[in-house]
């Protein structure tokens, strides 16, 4: 991707506020200069200060989990262990992942802003993922060669000798529900509602330490710089940070690329990248207002990915619903997962998602009513599309093609 | 890498003239921009809360030690019952002491020697058999204190008779009695040490350290208080057993697991201790003195904060009251009620750790280790 050459600098109005008063402790406030590099490269004393290993690790774990969910030689226990990996256990093909102390489950629905005082829902979401993983092994792998029909789990092939999809009794591919819930519950939630949040960025002495360039013991970065990088890592952790290619993972990086390729949304990738760069530069320059403005831009754009892709798949399913159940069920499964991910989005200027968990659950039960995908109607898909698009700044037509 | 420097594009010069002396638009709170009497608060904490708590705890532990002597001399079910009662009484008072990790308590790792759970049964058994142990060793933090006594008084048999047999019939009976005795005596000695230090010297140092620096008394105690609320209270009593930090609920991690039906009673004592400290309520007389609530009320713009915190405590207590007497049982039968309780408790963490600390201009001296 070609980097945008112009980084919007309108934010950089510098206000010199001179207070004159009878009290003697007023200072003349001068904003420091913000130096904005072309790419996400930041250094201190010649050493890079950018670090997000933990995010890369989790994305790689999630990638491997995704492929294993369609490997019917895996057991339920093996799949669950990939999700809730314990340090040293041989759950992955990659020794580095096995050695890691990190896992996906503990970071599912785990953001400071949304879940620190809502562990009840957090555990419900994690348990739901566990249940889907178990069902993949117990209901899908065991019916690998059964033909799926109404009320019967099994395989269903897309028309014209297309891909074989493995669905439950209502037509849902559990693997799509699982991975897109992780896209929302891990990547989106951690990025938007944890690492870009003032509750995390400004925690404890972070501001004071960042102002004084007090770095983490043995590291080149301040805590605040690192938190921002961790948000960055959930999108670019397996990509080239200076020249993103997209499609480098099965999660946000992949789907931001997809949205970018839709002419209605071209440019979104630069907007997101520029905001990450400028926000990080603002941290270096101790300009926290500018930083938070960038966080809001990222929140809006990343949230849109879930909204756009949900509408896109709902609309795509319409054309195949009558004559190509395999293709339709695949689209609907993606839609199902993206709708579920909406509860982790973040409306700018708020501490709320675009759609609450209750709203999301209502939409999902509408989709799964009766025999689920087997008898869902175009009217239902349109109604859901309209409901989603109306809350975002795009139309059903823009997202749907 | 090309770097571009953006200099001021727009310069807005705002001149503000003000002659009011109490201008505090930033909400910042430098040393004593408020008129709050910090010294009076520290004196209330020391003289009406902390020292009386240690005195009561010490006397309860003296009773425990005395009952232990009676039981050692005559291990009968009746004497066991008295010993158990003494343990319960002391454990309840402990709930008022655990939040204070300053002075001698901090120096000797007092809290780690009094209430680390789950206790390690293997370590306890090894200590008993070897008869070669240093109870002050860090390795024995999970083999001493109230949780170790929980095991020794309830966990070594299913019935009262079986527990008495543990101390009477086996070849190891004498060794077991000695360990029981050493545990009990050590808890009392440690508490006495902490109490005497407060009474003999630390009290005056403590109340005179009124400055708002990292080592000032208010700073230290407020940090301890919030840390206790977040870790000792919220996480240890609720979050860990409910599985908030693990893949599955862990019912055997509750406080006083072997007594089994005592965890709720202890949590309610702790809840009272937390609220009493926040509102400055004297431990013995119950009368109100200078407190964190008063301090917040004295700062412009924070009048609602102390009320919010107090009402959150009330909500937490109400919810705890609906739980099973045994948190282990609660976790096994309806863990959602347990996580809901955790969530209500957590809401006050934000009020305390973010809003209150900001208002008081106090820095947190610990950070959750939840990053990557």
Image: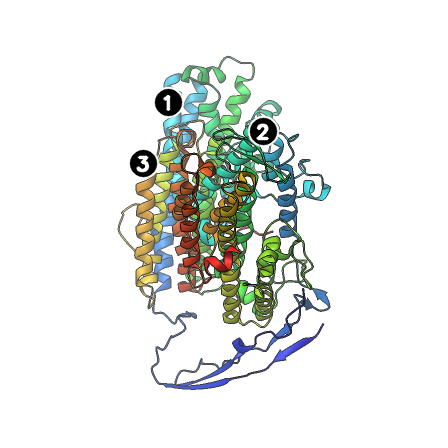
Q: Residue at x 38, y 41 (%)?
A: B341
Q: Earlier in the sequence, mark 2 or mark 1?
A: 1
Residue bearing mark 2: B123
Chain that bears disc 3: B
The residue sitting at the top extreme is B169
Viewed as shown, does residue A322 lie left or right of B284? Answer: right
Residue B233, position in %: x, y? Answer: 43, 43
Q: Residue at x 44, y 60 (%)?
A: A392
Point out the frontmost of discs 2 and 3.
3
Q: Quadrant of the N terminus of chain B?
A: bottom right
Front residue (pair B242, A293): A293
The answer to which image quadrant residue A39 occupies is bottom right
Asked whether residue A399 appears in the rendered view, the answer is yes
Residue bearing mark 1: B81
| Tag 2–tag 3 contact (CB < 8 Å) | no
Viewed as shown, does residue B166 lie left or right of A65? Answer: left
Label 2 packing within 10 angstroms: few (<14), some (14-19), many (20+): some
Label 3 packing within 10 angstroms: few (<14), some (14-19), many (20+): few
Q: Earlier in the sequence, mark 3 or mark 1?
A: 1
Viewed as shown, does residue B306 lie left or right of B156? Answer: left
Residue A363, position in %: x, y? Answer: 41, 46
Cα–Cα gap, marks 2 and 1: 25 Å
SS category of the residue bearing label 3: loop
Chain that bears disc 1: B
């Amino acid at each position: 991707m070609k980097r945008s050459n112009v980084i919007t600098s309108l934010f950089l109005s510098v206000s010199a506020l001179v207070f004159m008063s009878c009290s003697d402790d007023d200072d003349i406030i001068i904003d420091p200069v913000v130096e904005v590099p072309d790419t996400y490269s930041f250094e201190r004393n010649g050493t890079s200060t950018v670090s997000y290993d933990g995010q890369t690790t989790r994305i790689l774990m999630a990638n491997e989990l995704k492929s294993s969910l369609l490997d019917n030689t895996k057991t339920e226990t093996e799949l669950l262990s990939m999700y809730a990996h314990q340090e040293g256990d041989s759950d992955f093909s990659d020794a580095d992942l096995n050695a890691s102390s990190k896992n996906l489950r503990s970071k599912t629905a785990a953001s400071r802003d949304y879940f620190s005082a809502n562990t009840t829902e957090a555990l419900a979401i994690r348990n739901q993922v566990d249940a889907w993983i178990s069902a993949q092994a117990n209901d899908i792998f065991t019916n690998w060669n059964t033909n799926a029909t109404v009320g019967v789990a099994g395989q269903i092939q897309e028309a014209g000798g297309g891909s074989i999809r493995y669905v439950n009794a209502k037509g849902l591919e559990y693997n799509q529900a699982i991975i897109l819930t992780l896209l929302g519950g891990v990547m989106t939630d951690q990025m938007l509602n944890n690492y870009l949040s003032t509750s995390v960025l400004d925690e404890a002495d972070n501001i004071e330490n960042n102002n004084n360039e007090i770095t983490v013991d043995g590291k080149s970065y301040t805590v605040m710089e690192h938190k921002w990088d961790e948000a960055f890592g959930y999108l670019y952790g397996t990509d080239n940070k200076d020249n993103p290619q997209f499609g480098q993972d099965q999660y946000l990086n992949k789907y931001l690329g997809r949205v970018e390729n839709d002419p209605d949304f071209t440019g979104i990738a630069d907007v997101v990248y520029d905001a990450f760069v400028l926000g990080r530069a603002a941290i270096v320059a101790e300009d926290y207002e500018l930083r938070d403005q960038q966080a809001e831009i990222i929140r809006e754009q990343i949230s849109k990915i879930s909204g756009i892709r949900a509408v896109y798949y709902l609309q795509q399913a319409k054309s195949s619903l009558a004559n190509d159940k395999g293709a339709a069920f695949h689209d609907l499964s993606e839609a199902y997962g993206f709708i579920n991910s909406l509860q982790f989005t973040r409306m700018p200027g708020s501490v709320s998602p675009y759609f609450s968990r209750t709203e999301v659950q209502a939409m999902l039960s509408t989709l799964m009513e009766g025999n689920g995908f087997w008898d869902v109607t175009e009217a239902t898909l349109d109604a859901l599309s309209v409901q989603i698009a109306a809350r975002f700044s795009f139309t059903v037509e823009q997202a749907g093609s | 890498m090309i770097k571009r420097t953006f200099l001021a594009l727009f310069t807005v010069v705002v001149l503000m003239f003000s002659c009011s002396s109490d201008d505090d638009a930033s909400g910042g709170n430098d040393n004593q921009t408020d008129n709050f009497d910090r010294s009076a608060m520290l004196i209330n904490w020391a003289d009406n809360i902390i020292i009386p708590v240690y005195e009561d705890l010490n006397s309860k532990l003296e009773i425990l030690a005395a009952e232990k002597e009676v039981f050692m001399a005559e291990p009968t079910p009746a004497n066991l019952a008295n010993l158990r009662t003494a343990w319960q009484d002391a454990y309840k008072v402990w709930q008022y002491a655990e939040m204070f990790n300053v002075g001698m308590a901090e120096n000797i790792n007092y809290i780690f020697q009094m209430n680390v759970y789950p206790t390690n049964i293997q370590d306890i058994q090894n200590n008993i058999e070897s008869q070669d142990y240093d109870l002050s060793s860090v390795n024995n933090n999970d083999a001493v204190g109230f949780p170790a006594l929980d095991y020794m008084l309830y966990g070594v048999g299913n019935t009262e008779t079986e527990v008495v047999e543990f101390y009477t019939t086996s070849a190891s009976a004498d060794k077991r009695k000695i360990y029981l005795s050493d545990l009990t005596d050590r808890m009392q000695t440690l508490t006495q040490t902490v109490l005497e230090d407060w009474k003999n010297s630390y009290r005056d140092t403590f109340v005179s350290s009124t400055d708002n620096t990292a080592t000032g008394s208010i700073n230290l105690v407020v940090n301890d208080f919030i840390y206790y609320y977040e870790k000792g209270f919220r996480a240890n009593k609720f979050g860990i057993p409910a599985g908030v930090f693990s893949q599955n609920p862990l019912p055997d991690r509750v406080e006083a697991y072997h007594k089994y039906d005592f965890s709720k009673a202890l949590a309610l004592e702790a809840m009272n201790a937390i609220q009493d400290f926040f509102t400055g309520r004297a431990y013995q007389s119950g009368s109100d003195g200078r407190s964190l609530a008063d301090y917040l009320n004295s700062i412009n713009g924070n009048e609602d904060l102390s009320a919010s915190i107090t009402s959150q405590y009330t909500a937490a207590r109400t919810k705890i009251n609906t739980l099973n007497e045994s948190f282990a049982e609660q976790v096994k039968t309806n863990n959602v009620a347990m996580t809901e309780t955790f969530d209500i408790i957590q809401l006050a963490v934000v009020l305390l750790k973010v809003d209150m600390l900001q208002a008081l201009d106090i820095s947190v001296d610990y950070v959750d280790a939840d990053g990557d």
